[in-house]
Image (tube, rainbow, N blue to C red):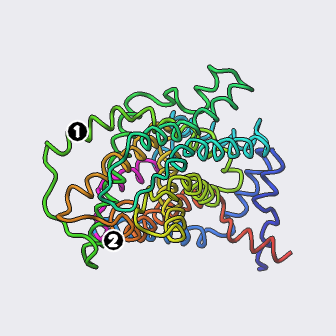
Amino acid sequence: MSRPRPTRHSTAEYMRTGTSTTRASARTNTVAQYPAARAERAALARVIDKSFTAASLPLLGLPPQWSVLHHWSASLHDRPGHPAVRSVKAMERTSTSGSSRSDLILFLSISFIGAWITMIPLWVEGLRRTSAAQGTPRLAALCMILMMLVPALTAFGLTARGRGPRQAVRVLGLARATPWRHEVRSVAVALTIPLGLTAAGLTVAALVGWYTPAHLPGPATVAPLVLSALLSVPLYFGEELGWQGYLLPRLLRYGRTRGLLIGGAIWGAWHVPMTALGGSYPGHSVLLGIPVAVVTAMLLGTVIATVRLSTGSVWAAVAAHLSLNEFTLPLTREVSGRLVDPLLAGPLSISTWPVTALAVLGSWLAYRRRAGRDQPLPAVEGRLTASR
């Protein structure tokens, strides 16, 4: 008995037809002819995903909430009617409709030029951080506040120009996109992620002798940080409405993985006016500080964007960014018994790179697992297409 020839439909072909009959036929034929391969592939994805989660979380010192976020977001994507999923789908539609490349270039041009303009007073005054022991002068604080508002104001202006102010608030994510219960839970989980990554990174730094923990922070240390974080919330909306509300949907047209990495690199390059003045890595050469800042931003920006995509909430992305700056940075200094070099220890340090990279890898594996579950054996279909 001769073996039936495999279908010659590829995923791209039956998606282009736009008809459910052709799509269902291609899926049925492929699955029927390769049941063993499909089962093996699904089992392998589950093993890799579970192994990574089980092995990496204790090793890295990440909080269990990271696993909760992963499994929670995975279950949400199995529920197409959930508001979080609808929010992400609407964002993905933005990447392919009603937005041109010229809009993206205009947004980036204004955001970058605006960032440099806001830093001009510091360059004129000759202010530069040469030591981690230096505080932040009032002029520098004011310039940084103005710089953080540039992306949101740019995004709002460009969006309101075409859709009106009310629609701009909704499209960019300032208006709540999901029920309150989901938003609160998303924000709570997002707040813990930078703390977990930083704790794991500090463990690495302590093992190699770059960090010396002295004591745990007490209420007298944490309370002022909480107050400062609450007052700073509008500033972080100022950044994330631009990056996650406007930029990210338009980068998804280049693919999820590529879009997240490009977005992180853009985020790092946008900080150059401040990094060049010793903002992130005082006492180090600009030639070292800027590349380190870009790599760090690519990793942390990918984590923040993954929070946005996993929860469907810009508010959660704001919480992750706020936790990074308002809690992990000052707590790193408070817990240590000596002066900390931000290049070697802390959330922006090279000691946190491996931890963050593993977190990014874990989220990528989870995404591939979901994508593989939704696609009918793309690897097999790709080989069939290539053999024609």
- 202 above or below 165? below
Q: Nearer the viewer, residue 141 or 162?
A: 141
Q: Quadrant of the N terminus?
A: bottom right
Which callout, 1 or 2, points at the residue further toward the start of the chain? 2
- Residue 260 quadrant: bottom right
Please say whether residue 299 is visible from this viewpoint: yes
The label number, if any, that marks residue 224 in the structure image: 1
Q: Amino acid at mark 2?
A: Ala
Magenta extent: 59-74
Would residue 317 be counted in the magenta stretch? no
Q: Is residue 3 left or right of residue 298?
A: right
Q: Residue at x 63, y 30 (%)?
A: 156
- Which residue in the protein does label 2 denote? 55
**What amino acid type should be assigned to the residue bearing mark 1?**
Pro
Residue 258 image offset from top left, x and y in percent:
64, 60
Mark 2 secondary-structure assignment: helix
